[in-house]
Image (cartoon, rainbow, N blue to C red):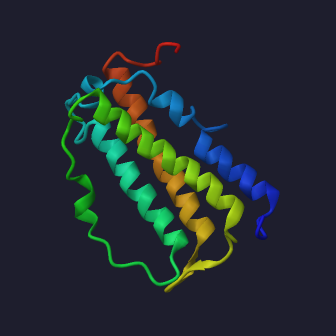
Amino acid sequence: MAGNPAYVTQSMNGAFEGRHAHPPPSHVLSGLDAALAGAKLDGFPHTIHQLVQHLVFWQDMGLDWIQRTEPPPDIDNSADWSWDAAPADDAAWRETLDRFFGGLDLAKRTMAKEDLATTIPGWDHVSRLDVLQTIASHNSFHLGQVVSMRRLLGAWPPKEE
């Protein structure tokens, strides 16, 4: 396991899967179609679709940082909120969800093969574990927003599938 204690992997898997602190991401995002994902709510600056696109963007970015052998490039933080409010259709929404869940799977596989104590090249103060923890907590924060939005939309809890 490349030097990762079992409890770290177990704890991080729990963070990505939603154990203990919140429902699993698969539950939070289940039963949403393109119309609900793109619904605008007063008081919320983004739609569910935009939140999930934002999660995909940063999840992909963090996983790229973990795999790098040279320092990551500078990031334009304003670029990650430029998505359309709604997906084009249900197929496009499913593609977004597939990217999000594919990133979660990659994060879990990464824990098994990377030495999480090593730092990101050029960032001597940031370990691979730090990046994975940031992804997990960032996902948790925004998935909590999705739950609140679904409540206001009358779509929480999801119907049993």
Describe residue 149's horizontal placement relative to residue 39 as left or right. Answer: right
Q: Position of residue 13 (x, y in %)?
A: 67, 48
Residue 49, compared with residue 8, is above or below; it is above
Residue at position x 41%, y 38% from top?
Answer: 97
Residue at position x 22%, y 42% from top?
Answer: 45
How many tags in the picture?
0
Residue at position x 54%, y 65% from top?
Answer: 131
Residue 65, compared with residue 58, is above or below; it is below
Residue 55, compared with residue 3, is above or below; it is above
Q: Position of residue 94 (x, y in %)?
A: 37, 33
Describe residue 107's horizontal placement relative to residue 83 as left or right. Answer: right
Describe residue 108's horizontal placement relative to residue 140 as left or right. Answer: right
Q: Farthest residue in the front direction?
A: 91
Q: Position of residue 31 (x, y in %)?
A: 42, 21
Q: Position of residue 134 (x, y in %)?
A: 52, 59
Residue 150 position by quadrant: top left
Q: Is residue 47 visible?
A: yes
Q: Which quarter of the rendered picture does the N terminus lie within?
A: bottom right
- Along the line of sight, the residue nearer the viewer: 20 or 48: 48
Residue 82, compared with residue 121, is above or below; it is above
Residue at position x 40%, y 49% from top?
Answer: 55
